[in-house]
């Protein structure tokens, strides 16, 4: 389950999660601002940091992926694989990204 979560959530973060967490907005960010890391430059530092935008996004992805994996221990082998995958995707989109946006993004 954790290896599947790593793959699924990495793609989800790359496609829309980073944009939801770190673009402008009130409750959550705009999902198209940094869609698939669009508008992030390898040569320019992320505001307030000395690392590039894609590197910052990849670093933040580590936390977006590990958080649901930690929850997996609470219900390991008690949930079917399909519903588990749907649950972690929805949890990242509707819980983690807005919370991350309100704490560090926008």
Image (cartoon, rainbow, N blue to C red):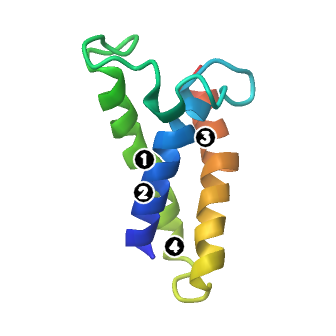
Q: Nearer the viewer, residue 97 or 34?
A: 34
Number of marks in picture: 4
Which residue: 67% across, 57% down?
Answer: 90
Q: Nearer the viewer, residue 76 or 39?
A: 39
Instruction: Compute the Cα span from label 4 to label 1.
Output: 15 Å
Where residue 63 is drawn, which disc sits there? 1
Residue 26 vs residue 43: left or right? right
Instruction: Compute the Cα span from label 1 to label 3.
Output: 11 Å
Mark closest to the chain's N terminus, 3 or 4: 4
Instruction: Compute the Cα span from label 3 to label 4.
Output: 18 Å
Dot 2: element: helix
Q: Quadrant of the N terminus?
A: bottom left
Read off the residue under disc 3: 97
Residue 94 vs residue 44: left or right? right
Where residue 66 is drawn, which disc sits there? 2
* 4, above or below 49, in the image: below
Mark closest to the chain's N terminus, 4 or 1: 1
Where residue 105 is drawn, which disc sits there? none
Instruction: Compute the Cα span from label 4 to label 2.
Output: 10 Å
Asked if labels 2 and 1 touch by Cβ distance under 8 angstroms, the answer is yes
Asked if labels 2 and 4 touch by Cβ distance under 8 angstroms, the answer is no
Instruction: Compute the Cα span from label 2 to label 3.
Output: 13 Å
* 7, above or below 60, in the image: below
Dot 4: element: helix
Which residue: 46% across, 51% down?
Answer: 11
Which residue: 26% across, 15% down?
Answer: 50
């Amino acid at each position: 389950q954790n290896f599947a979560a790593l793959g699924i959530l990495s793609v989800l973060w790359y496609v829309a999660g980073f944009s939801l967490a770190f673009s402008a907005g009130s409750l959550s960010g705009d999902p198209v601002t940094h869609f698939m890391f669009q508008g992030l430059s390898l040569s320019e530092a992320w505001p307030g940091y000395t690392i590039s935008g894609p590197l910052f996004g990849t670093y933040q992805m580590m936390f977006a992926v590990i958080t649901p994996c930690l929850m997996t221990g609470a219900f390991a082998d008690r949930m079917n694989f399909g519903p588990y995958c749907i649950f972690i995707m929805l949890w990242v989109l509707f819980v983690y990204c807005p919370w991350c946006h309100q704490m560090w993004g926008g």
